[in-house]
Amino acid sequence: MTGRIIAVAIVAGVCAGAPAGAGVPSGVNLAALGNWDIVIAPDAPPSTRYAAEEFQALFGAASGTKLAIATAVERPDRHIFIGASPAMRASGAGFEVAGFGEEDFRIIIRDGAIAIAGGEPRGTLYGVYTFLEDYVGVRFLTADHTHVPPLPAWKIVGPVDRSYHPPLAMRWSYYGEVNRDPAFAARIRVNTVGLDPRHGGRTGITNISHSFFHQIPSQKYGPEHPEYFALVDGKRLAPVKNDGYDTEPCLTNPEVLKIVTAAVLEEIAGHPEQSNVSVSQNDNAKYCRCPACAAVDAREGTPMGSLLEFVNAVADVVAAKYPRVKVGTLSYWYTRRPPKTIRPRPNVQIQLCSIECCLLHPIADPACPKNVEFCRDLEGWGKICENVSIWNYNTNFTNYLLPCPNLRVLEPNVRFFVTNQAKGIFMQAAGNAWAAELSDLRNYMIANLIWDPNRSGQELMDEFLRLHYGPAAPPIRQYIDLVHDAAAASGAHQNCFARQATQYGLDPSIAPKAVALFDEALARAGSDAVKARVEKASIAALRLAIDPVWYADDPAKVDAQILEKLRPVIRRFVGLCERFRVDQASEHEAFATARERLRRLIGEK
């Protein structure tokens, strides 16, 4: 199977000269399944039982019929087989799942039977969600809004025989609404959240991240052995208060290798479900400049030289004891460039990070100066490593609520990564926050694109707007175009850290029009539910309007006329943030802190 959905549809009568009933398979009328049942194996695993329950509930909502779930069959047809079972294999739609990956699935619809089954633990569950989406029209929009259209009086599907192998083995749309709701994560096929076996657990391929701070902490080893840590400007950085930001290990010290290797082996032994383990730099640029480390880095043309040599040494030990486990390291910041001569071991995974890249232009855009070097580095890693994954940045970490005009680059970026053989993508966004800027729309687009990179980002956007906002969708689409067109016209190039809207090409002069478009959307909403969704989305436009005074905390230092004009906007903004439980203003600032600053500014407690 490939990374695409393979669909085979043979409709009765398309074969020239084929008489009815002469072995030509027939489809199924989904609107006439009232006397069908759902069949699972008696010993079906939790995720398959849950898949059957999900099918029962969501198909029932669409059809008005609650199908029974059975573990045995007493007739030859009118069954929906979910998961592998002897009954499924013996049916006219039967097949074997031996050799399927843990998320691969196959759907067969023909001759009075439907079979949906896949690899364990998530293949069958993901197959059910795909069936419900593609044949029933279900859309998992948000955790609390699933679109289930009523089935028409007549809906023929099939015959169908289709299989799917997800092109990305690790997928993470990193939003608070996903991270805090494993059931929703399973529905949108984000496979990195939650451990519940009903949801298929999560992939053993963990996100590679900073690890040295806990594998060789300076508070433990630094007092007696400062030589284990980085030499910078003639001083060993140990012990320090915060290893993550203040030090790195000396990677050519043989004792450091022993300590980190022992910590890695202990971690693998304690987490047998994991398929990889991190051996990676801390989140700082204070790498070791001692003569031995500096010599390796000079020879290789990058500080990745000493890091990869170290990671390879750990990987050799891991390979001997745990041959199925990959050893992953970040290619991040000063280690993004591949080394000249050192090559990753076959069991080494490189996770390439795009933190310097421009959010406003596709990463593959040759005219974007911030993105050219990343493309060069990705190409370089692809030539020497078969295990490359991506850490991509998709929000403004300095301002979670400010408009971030990068929705148009989501689709080309995901496709670029997949085309360059990425095995997994961590789409980092406001993962520690709730109700960040357009988080519901962004998550819908990202989750669908990393599940199926062949989808259109613009079509996904329009679908979400239409289904989630109904009659209020057109002005919201105009707002999205307003901010994206302004950013494009500005010629700005900016990464994922912007203190002011102007850094993304968004002049505050467009704010009145942005707010007016949401006012129009509210007037069109038509129901309290839609009105609430529009109000939540409008927070971004209000945040843009108050950007000129966002950091001010002394009203005496702000133009009185500007403050008087913005006072009701600030009140509206704060009120909506409280109503929709906004909890973070940025990656490192709680919304409560920003709220108090704004209230002081307008003279309110």
Image: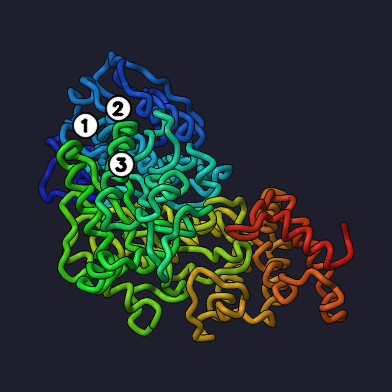
Mark positioned earlier in the residue sequence (1 or 3): 1
**Picture quarter containing residue 410?**
bottom left
Q: Amino acid at mark 2?
A: Phe
State the image coordinates of residue 35 (x, y, percent, origin top left).
39, 23
Q: Which residue is mark 2?
A: 81
Location of residue 450 (image quadrant): bottom left
> Is disc 2 placed on a helix, strand or loop?
strand
Asked if residue 430 shows in the view, the reply is yes
Left of 540 or right of it: where is 354? left
Residue type, mark 3 in image: Val
Residue 204 image point, x, y percent: 32, 40
- Who's the residue at 78% across and 63% down the image? 597
Could you classify mark 3 by the number of other residues whose Cα lies within 10 Å: few (under 14), some (14-19), or many (20 or more)? many
Query: In percent of the image, x 44 and y 27: which residue is there?
Result: 53
For marks 2 and 3, the one nearer the N-term is 2
In the image, residue 90 sits, relative to residue 251, either above or below, namely above
Mark 2 and mark 1 residues within 8 Å of each other at the beta carbon: yes
Tag 1: amino acid: Ala
Q: Nearer the viewer, mark 1 or mark 3?
A: 3
Q: Is residue 556 above or below residue 327?
A: below
Q: CA distance from mark 2 to mark 3?
A: 43 Å
- Which of the labelled discs sits on residue 264, or is there none? 3
Sooner in the amino-acid sequence: mark 2 or mark 1 = 2
Q: Secondary structure at mark 1?
A: loop
Q: Is residue 426 left or right of residue 338?
A: right
Residue positioned most to the front: 224
Q: Which residue is mark 1?
A: 93
